[in-house]
Image (cartoon, rainbow, N blue to C red):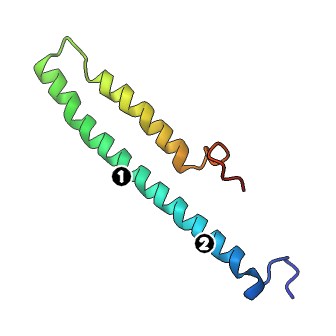
Amino acid sequence: MTGYGHEPGPENAGVEESVANEARQARRRLKGFGTHLALYFMVMVVLVPVNFTLSPGNPWFLLPMVGWGSVLALHAAYAMGLFRGLLGKQR
């Protein structure tokens, strides 16, 4: 007995599997957010120069930047698990 309160064995297999499943879901959420973030930056790298080339006096690139950026911020909060309580997944 190690005294840590968590002994490996068949009686704790469900707990270990639950922790492993939660870790897998967290990695999947983080990977999805990383893909979303990379796509956002790739599109913005194209939109900003296109805007300044075609219509330098009208900064229309700000609309998709702020709109998509706010959705991206929500996705970041989801990936970090900040909505876990709101979605009914209490720890």
Furthest residue to the left? Answer: 54
Furthest residue to the front? Answer: 88
Q: Is residue 43 visible?
A: yes
* Left or right relative to 30: residue 48: left
Residue 76, percent across and down? 50, 44
**Numbered disc total:** 2
Residue 13, percent across and down? 70, 81
In space, the residues marked 1 and 2 are separated at their CA atoms by: 23 Å
Q: Secondary structure at mark 1?
A: helix
User: Would you call the spot at circle 2 few (<14 residues within 10 Å), some (14-19), or many (20 or more)?
Assistant: few
Residue 6 against residue 52 in the figure, above or below: below
Residue 67 against residue 34 in the figure, above or below: above
Q: Amino acid at mark 2?
A: Ala
Q: Residue at x 43, y 57 (%)?
A: 31
- Quarter of the picture holding the C terminus: bottom right
Question: Depth-wise, is mark 1 or mark 2 nearer the camera?
Answer: 2
| Residue corresponding to mark 1 | 35
In this view, the residue in front, 68 or 4, is: 68
| Residue corresponding to mark 2 | 20
Q: Residue at x 15, y 28 (%)?
A: 50
User: Would you call the spot at circle 1 few (<14 residues within 10 Å), some (14-19), or many (20 or more)?
Assistant: few
